[in-house]
Each structure stands twice: as structure tokens, then as C-alpha cells.
Amino acid sequence: MSNILAFQYVVIGGGISGVTCVETLATFAPEATILLLTGSPLIKAITHYVKLSKFLEEFDISEKPFSYLAEQHSNLTLLNKIVDHLDTDKHTLICTDDTIIKYDKLCICAGAHPKLICDSNPFVLGIRDTETVDSFQKKLLSAKQIVIVGNGGIATELVYEVENCSVIWAVRDEHISTTFFDEAAACFFLDKIQQKKNNQEEKLNEKRTKYETVEITNKPIKMTSSISGGALGPDWAVNRTMKGLGQKTRQIHIEYKVEVKSVLTPDELERRQLISENMFSEHNNWPVYVELTNGKIFGCDLIVSATGVVPNTDMFVKSAPFVIGQDGGLEVDEFMRTSVKDVYAAGDVCTAGWKHAEHWFQMRLWSQARQMGHYAAKCMLAHMSNDDNISMDFCFELFAHVTKFFNMKVVLLGKYHENDMKKYDNLIRVTPGEEYIRVTLKDGRVHGCVFIGDTEMEETFENLILNQMDVSAYGESLLDPDIDIADYFD
Ligand code: FAD
């Protein structure tokens, strides 16, 4: 006999979007019955939340046992179960252990998984959760050379963190870290990449507690299924030693404008008689080889595939006619509703399908996972009491992200990536090694900004993007270090 449970609100996923969603539901509806179902035995909790400005927020993430949430909210149940499929006509979901759960409103916060360049080779790794980063660290210990493929945040952080191991960084574009930076900003960081990390200085610069994991009963928690734990997040790499077997502390080689053509085992390489002048390695006894589109072949101990993520939608799509968004997520409307009745979605699994504000766009980040989880809960609560009068959360008015790369503060605002010199005016201020600022103007109004270093200008420019004041008359004095811009626009 199957076990049948019933709750008013059910949320799938113990990552930051699911946890924020149930916390909001439990806080605003203390009488409601709420269930958090998650494939991982730990949940992600936000600690040390700090609001830096109207839109910028900073926080740490900890992995916590279920009791952490259950003790705070008596109306919240947490279960470590994997959802196998949904029967949305009957408002039920069925778990792999045959438990049937009925819901009135469901929110899917199932996250995403790394897009792998090759999933049949054991030497190709994706980094997503604590387990995968543990496995990477272990394999790195005996590695002399690794290849990192990808040009986003994870690749950028890894290249900086890995020491005593030769790193071949294969990037698709003309410069590094294109997800976040233009060419000039990438150049600003290039020196930092080759520099030896000063670990003493690193420690001094760490202002915040970092990403924390727990061990319960002194044993690391093991995942028991193919479902991954919640994604890692801010500062995930900082407390970890990422050292290989090599002699030199830092040795980074970047291959620009390339993609991976094939991943080869030693046998495959031999069969194709590719051991030739194209080989870029000291010896030929590597366990795996990467062939790039520029014809070069690199042997290595390990390949890290950091080429983006794929939303975890497969199981849901097989269960019900969910509309899928352009980037592969469950499409949600301005109330975080999917196309299926009474089913909402938030975080990495969803695609924001509403008409976006001029200076906001979706990026799969901690901050957006938190904001979406919170807003989805508000919408579910309102709809439960037949209230359709919900105004969209103001956080969706402006894209704002604060992070750290190469141990420097990075703030991104608005459409910071729309900076084509032919279409927009760009104001740039650089102090090598210290700060890089780029402000993009569209029709004389601030369209997007990048601030690297401790510039303390983000709040002023946040306001300028929001109020769309015509600043064309100020010209380059907008970035004049001798003018107190905050005071001027106050
Ligand atoms: P997830 O955290 O992936 O959670 C999904 C949850 O759903 C998991 O608990 C999983 O077990 C559960 N689940 C899935 N399927 C099922 C099922 N069938 N049944 C039951 N449970 C299921 N963002 C930043 O803002 N800044 C950063 O510096 C940053 N760095 C990152 C570094 C790394 C290495 C990675 C991987 C990501 C990083 N991100 C960063 C992105 C950020 O971590 C994610 O956007 C965010 O964590 C997504 O949260 P989520 O709750 O949507 O999904």
C-alpha cells in the first residue's frame, strides 16, 4: 500500500529558491500545512544577509540539516524524497519510494545541472554541488595538468583558485570571462591570473563568512541518487585547497576562440594516429585528451566542463504539458505560474517568461533564486485566497549582482553586457590593479555599469539607471575621481 500524504503547499527542492519559498510560506501562513521535498539530505540556508543598497544584496550560504528549518516553523514538514512524476490532473506527485503526495499549490524549485561537453568519459567533470566539488578536489590532488572549458563565472573562479597544476583554459570568445566582462575588463584581470596568489593577503581580504558545509555524525553526507544537492554559491571555492601535483604554483595557458571538438581516450587518440606535432604536452601518457577546434590537442588528468547549466525539467515535462521557455526552463508568467494549473516554479529551473523591465534580465544566480522563491510564495499565498491583486516585486526592476572575482569586488548593474561601442557611449575609468569602471549610456541615460574594486559608486548609478535621468551633459565628469558624484546627485 502506498503512503498518501496531503499538504496545502508543496515545494520541490532544497536549494536556495525552495528554502526561501517555504520560509516565506511558513512565515506568512503559520496555520497552513507546508511540505518541502528534496532529493538531497541537506538544505541550503541563507545566513548573514546584508542589503548593500536598494537592489544589491550579499549573503552567505550554509548547508543545514532539516531540523534547522523544522525548529523555526512548526507548520513545515521536510522530507528527503525524490519526486518521480506528477499527476497534475489529480494534484498529486509520486515519489520514487511510491509515496503519493497531494497538494493544493505546488512550486517546482528543482534547479539545474551542468551542461557537460561529454558525459561518457569519467575524466570529464561538471561542478554543481558539494559532492562534485569534493570529487574535483580529490582528483586534482594527483593532477599535473587540467583543462577547464567554459568562460563564465565557475570557469573564471576555478582558474584563479587552482594552484600547483598546469591549467589549460579553453574559451570560446576573444577574451576571458565574457559572461561578466568586456575586453577591457578582461585585460584588467589578465595580470591577476598569472600572479601567484598571496594567501596571507587573501585571508585579510575575506570580509565575510564563506560558503559552509556541515558534516552530521562526523560523517560526510552522501547522496544516494542521481539527483544532485543544491548548487554551490558565493565563495564556494575560497575555503577549499585546490592544489595539484605540479611544481609551479601558477601556470595558466589560455586558448582563445576555441571549442572542444572531441574528448579522446588514449586508445582513441592512438587509433586516430593523432600523436603528432599537434600534441601540446610534455608526455603522451595522459588518461584523457581534448581536441580543440583550432586543431590543437592537449593531454590532461582531468577536464572541467563549465559551459553552463541545463534546467532540471525532464521529469516534469514527461508528466504534464509544461511550456518550456527559450533557454530550456519551465516558463513562468509574472506571478511565477507555469502553464500547468496550480503549479509554480522558481530559481534555476524556470525561465522568466514575462515582459521584463528595461533594465532587468534573468541570470541563474543565488540572488535571483532567493528573490524568485520569495515572490513565488507571495503569489501562491495570494492566489490561495483568490487575490489577484499582486504587484511584481521591485527587485525585478533592475538587474543587480555583487560578487568577487580574483579577490576583487565586482558589481554589475542593469544591462551591463549591452556595451557595443557602435551602439552605445561607454565611459571607462581604469586604475591598473585597483579599479575598473565602465558606465554605458543609451540615449544619454545610464543603461548598465560594471564596477570592479571598492569604488563605492554603485548606489548612485543604481538610482541613475532607475530614474533614467539624462546625464549626457555631464560627459566624462560622471567618472571624474575628483567629483563626489554621490553628493552631486543626492
Ligand atoms: P539548486 O540549488 O540546484 O537546488 C535544486 C534542489 O532541487 C536540490 O536540493 C535538488 O536535490 C532538488 N531536486 C531536484 N530534482 C528533484 C526531484 N526530482 N525530487 C526532489 N528534489 C529534487 N550564483 C551567484 O549568485 N553567485 C555565485 O558566486 C555563484 N557561484 C556559483 C558557483 C557554482 C560552482 C555553481 C554551481 C553555481 C553558482 N551560482 C552562483 C549559481 C547559484 O548557485 C544558483 O543559481 C542557485 O543556487 C540556484 O538555486 P536553486 O534553488 O534554483 O537550485
Image (cartoon, rainbow, N blue to C red):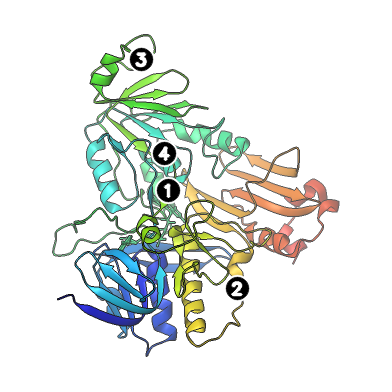
Q: Position of residue 369 (x, y in %)?
A: 46, 63
Q: Position of residue 246 (x, y in %)?
A: 27, 27
> What amino acid is labelled 1 in the image?
Val
Q: Residue at x 73, y 63 (%)?
A: 487
Q: Residue at x 57, y 61 (%)?
A: 353
Q: Residue at x 51, y 73 (%)?
A: 375
The Cα atoms of the two marked residues, 3 and 4, are separated by 25 Å
Residue at which label 4 appears: 160
> Of label 2 and label 3, which has the lower sequence position?
3
> Of label 4 and label 2, which has the lower sequence position?
4
Asked if the residue at label 1 sits under 8 Å from ligand 1, the reply is yes
Mark sitting on residue 279: 3
Q: Say if residue 418 shows up in the picture.
A: yes
Say which of 490 and 444 sits in front: 444
The correct choice, above or below, for 92 with respect to 357 in the image is below
> What amino acid is labelled 4 in the image?
Tyr
The Cα atoms of the two marked residues, 1 and 4, are separated by 21 Å
Say which of 417 and 314 sits in front: 314
Mark sitting on residue 392: 2
